[in-house]
């Protein structure tokens, strides 16, 4: 049997199929027809280089997607009295893109296999021009609230980029490196939340609060750059296939809903706080933040730290187990939310900012560990079937099939947590003029999450799945 050769070394897939050198394309359009990242020889002879090149440009495109998705968390700081929007209305404005982003994540997940990872990266980046150009047109005093709400909804397309990017990168890396790669991909994307807030601060400090269009205009050339980068340097994998039956089968598996619940607590918290924090500061500590720029000085720190630590969550999960990391992380999130509640009652701004920063950090850490749990859960289920006499190749294939589907489902449901966070804040401020009721709800939810993690994955060593 012949083998493909690169740099004087030969390799083939585990099935014995002949493999072209990684990075070469058997047909036009930057398609790779045979990809075997779990084969060490293939990986070391160029596969790693191709995977990391795709990862780098995927991170940049996803980063810009996150910035556009959370753009309205900064734009509401520019909407002064001339716009006539009360705090409750602003919470709805920042909830709208979170809701749309959670909805579009499922179709974006399927789009990778349908159109190719590179091809969809180009399309998804180009779609980001729609909400930015619309915002550039309508942002001026006198615009109707319904128009602003519609434009904010369109910004939700940025939330879909995460799902397609994660699905694509998941296919490029071997199982042993997925936790790190997915954590790095997601963390780099999450940095878009901090980046847009830093840029918002820069615009507020230079152009002033009456020029939100300057912030929007900054992103248009960056979006173009993301699309061009994807076109020139990313690849499509022809081995990526949509399995709609896998999605149906995944919905019948209880672990899908357990992980989705946990992901609401981690990613939902991160993105929800990212949308809401600036507005919360201005409403709850109004005397300390008479101008938007004073709030903007503090809003970027939490998302920045939460994004940077996300790959650490994936790495820790690779090393000591995602369930263990996730359990203790939710304990820490409950403690941080308690600190925020105490600070709110005592009206202590320094303690309040510290508690929220810790919430961002732990939600970022939990993002990485919870996502890593998904392939680990289904590998563990596969191993139990193999131990019971099932065929290894069949069981492993089923594990990969279901874990890919669950990544899409959990990502969509987790993003919806961002909507719940903002609605909780809106209702709390409407009812009690502070966020205390929302903080109590967060503490209770995190307690549910760490109890569920312990009960399902850590409680009984005789029956639980191992190495999750």
Image (cartoon, grey):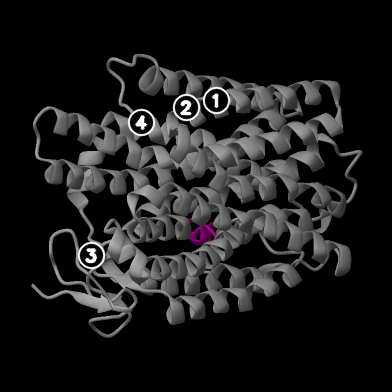
Q: Quadrant of the N terminus?
A: bottom left
| Kind of element beneath mark 3 | loop
**Residue contact between numbered discs 3 and 4, judged by CB atoms under 8 Å:** no
Please say if the residues under marks 2 and 1 sit with CB atoms less than 8 Å apart: yes
- What's the CA distance linking mark 3 and mark 4? 28 Å
Residue under label 1, please give it.
328
Pointer 1 or 4: first along the chain = 1
Q: Which residue is mark 4?
A: 467
C-alpha gap between disc 3 and disc 1:
37 Å
Q: Is residue 223 left or right of residue 136?
A: left
State the quadrant of the C terminus. top left
Give the tally of numbered discs: 4
Task: Give the magenta part as a residue range.
Answer: 153-159
Residue 260: x percent and y percent?
A: 40, 36
Predominant SS of the magenta segment: helix
Front residue of 318/417: it is 318
- Foreground label between 1 and 4: 4
- Please say if the residues under marks 1 and 4 sit with CB atoms less than 8 Å apart: no
Q: Is residue 145 visible?
A: no
**Does 32 sit above or below residue 203?**
below
Task: Quadrant for residue 253, please give it.
Answer: top left
Q: Does label 3 or label 4 sit earlier along the sequence?
A: 3
Regarding residue 212, the answer to whether it shows in the image is yes
Q: Distance from label 1 to label 4 (Cα)?
A: 16 Å
């Amino acid at each position: 049997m012949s083998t493909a050769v690169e740099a004087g070394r030969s390799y083939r897939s585990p099935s014995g199929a002949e493999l072209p050198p990684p990075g070469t394309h058997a047909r036009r359009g930057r398609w790779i027809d045979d990809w075997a990242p779990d084969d060490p020889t293939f990986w070391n002879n160029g596969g790693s280089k191709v995977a990391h090149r795709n990862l780098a440009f995927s991170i940049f495109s996803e980063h810009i997607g996150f910035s556009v998705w959370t753009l309205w968390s900064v734009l509401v700081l520019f909407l002064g009295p001339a716009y006539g929007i009360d705090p409750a209305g602003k919470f709805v404005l920042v909830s709208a893109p979170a809701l749309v982003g959670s909805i579009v994540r499922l179709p974006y997940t399927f789009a990778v296999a349908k159109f190719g990872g590179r091809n969809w990266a180009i399309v998804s980046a180009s779609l980001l021009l729609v909400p930015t150009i619309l915002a550039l047109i309508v942002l001026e005093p006198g615009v109707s609230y319904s128009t602003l709400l519609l434009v904010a909804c369109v910004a939700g397309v940025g939330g879909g980029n995460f799902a397609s990017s994660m699905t694509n990168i998941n296919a490029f890396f071997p199982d042993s490196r997925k936790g790190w790669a997915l954590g790095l991909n997601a963390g780099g994307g999450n940095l878009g939340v901090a980046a847009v807030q830093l840029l918002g601060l820069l615009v507020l400090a230079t152009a002033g609060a009456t020029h939100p269009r300057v912030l929007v205009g900054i992103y248009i050339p960056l979006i173009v750059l993301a699309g061009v980068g994807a076109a020139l340097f990313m690849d499509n994998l022809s081995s990526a296939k949509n399995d709609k039956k896998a999605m149906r089968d995944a919905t019948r598996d209880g672990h899908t809903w357990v992980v989705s619940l946990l992901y609401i607590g981690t990613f939902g918290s991160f993105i929800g706080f990212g949308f809401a924090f600036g507005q919360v500061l201005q409403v709850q500590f109004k005397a300390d933040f008479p101008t938007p720029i004073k709030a903007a000085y503090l809003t970027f720190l939490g998302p920045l730290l939460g994004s940077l630590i996300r790959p650490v969550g994936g790495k820790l999960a690779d090393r000591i187990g995602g369930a263990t990391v996730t359990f203790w992380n939710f304990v820490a999130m409950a403690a941080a939310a308690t600190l925020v509640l105490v600070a709110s009652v005592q009206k202590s701004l320094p303690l309040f900012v510290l508690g929220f920063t810790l919430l961002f950090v732990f939600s970022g850490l939990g993002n990485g560990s919870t996502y890593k749990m998904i392939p680990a859960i289904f590998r563990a289920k596969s191993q139990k079937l193999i131990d019971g006499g099932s065929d290894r190749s069949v069981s492993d294939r089923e594990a990969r099939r279901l874990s890919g589907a669950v990544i899409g489902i959990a990502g969509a449901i987790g993003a919806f947590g961002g909507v719940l966070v903002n609605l909780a804040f809106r209702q709390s401020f409407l009812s009690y003029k502070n966020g205390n009721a929302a903080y109590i709800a967060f503490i209770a939810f995190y307690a549910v999450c760490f109890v569920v993690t312990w009960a399902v994955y850590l409680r009984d060593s005789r029956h639980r799945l191992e190495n999750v």
